[in-house]
Amino acid sequence: MNIALILAAGSGTRMKNQTPKQFIEINDKPLFMYCVETFDHHPDIDMIIIATNEDSITKVKSYCKKFNITKVKKVIKGGISRQKSVYNCLMCLDLLGVDDNDNILIQDGARPLVNSQIISDNIEACNKFFAVNTVIPSTDTVIKSNDQETIYEIENRSQQYQGQTPQSFKFNIICDAHNKFKNSNDINITDDCRLVMNSGYPIHLVLGNKLNFKVTTPEDLIIFKALVAK
């Protein structure tokens, strides 16, 4: 099976809005629902799990009903961090009895413009390589600073990529990585690909696109509204 985990928890503090960013409505549709619809309509996606804030579970279920979403199996409580939300989703899938060889596509609910081609490419690559990350080549020079005031190093742009989602893994691989992290004293790992890499698995690249950006700031929201209007 191909299973999508949609992460729609968090407060969205950088948005400077009382409403969590995932629930900001654009054209009478909440932000997170744009990507949920894309996964729901994809012919190769079999199941969707949504992680959200505990007090928003009923709201998310009502949105799924309103927009005729058919593949959402569970809406569960997210965690205090992204990693905890993913872990909660994995434990939910474990209870549902999914297979070790199932593909797990982890998607930020704040990336509303993920498209069907990116999803298909993730599924194909995950079947071949078992662990993949969606990326786009960096078009800007990446500058490293140790003191946030002066340049320490200028990275080689040809080797730099910007990470996106989905990040996709075989179920047994992502579970193994999270279980190892759970028993670790390292609290600074905030990315599923880093968890999997630290468990000894290579991550292969899948090409995304610039429109698959994460809505984080008020400026991002303006861009997304303009794209939807167009």
Image (spheres, rainbow, N blue to C red):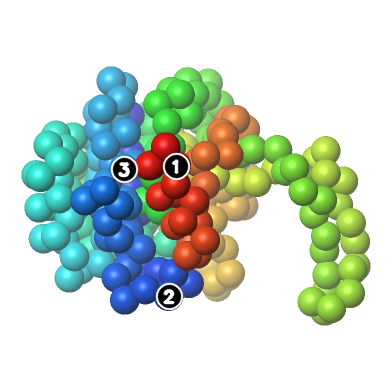
**Measured from the top left, where is residue 133 in percent x and y?**
56, 39
Task: From this view, report whether residue 116 is shown above or below residue 137.
Answer: above
Tell me the tag on residue 20.
Answer: none
Q: Secondary structure at mark 2?
A: loop
Instruction: Say left or right for 196 vs 179.
Output: right
**Measured from the top left, where is residue 88 in percent x and y?**
30, 58
Q: Quadrant of the C terminus?
A: top left
The alpha-carbon separation of the residues under discs 2 and 3 comes to 21 Å
**Measured from the top left, where is residue 227 in percent x and y?**
44, 42
Q: Quadrant of the N terminus?
A: top left
Please give the residue where the numbered disc 2 appears in the rendered image: 16
First in sequence: mark 2 vs mark 3: 2
Instruction: Give 62 or 179, whichever is nearer the viewer.
Output: 62
**Measured from the top left, where is residue 82 in percent x and y?**
42, 62
Instruction: Give 17 or 129, whichever is nearer the viewer.
Output: 17
Residue at image position (44%, 69%) is: 15
Amino acid type at circle 2 is: Lys
Q: Mark yes or no: residue 92 visible.
A: no
Please give the residue where the numbered disc 1 appears in the rendered image: 227
Q: Marks 1 and 2: in contact by CB < 8 Å?
A: no
Instruction: Say left or right for 19 vs 121.
Output: left
Q: Secondary structure at mark 3?
A: helix
Task: Please tell me whether mark 2 or mark 1 is closer to you in this view.
Answer: 1
Residue at image position (65%, 46%) is: 162
Amino acid type at circle 3 is: Tyr
Amino acid type at circle 1 is: Leu
10 Å neighbourhood of mark 3: few (<14), some, or many (≥20)? some
Please give the residue where the numbered disc 3 appears in the rendered image: 34
Task: From this view, report whether residue 121 is shown above or below residue 97.
Answer: above
Task: Please tell me whether mark 1 or mark 3 is closer to you in this view.
Answer: 1
Q: Mark yes or no: residue 22 visible.
A: yes
Q: Secondary structure at mark 1?
A: helix
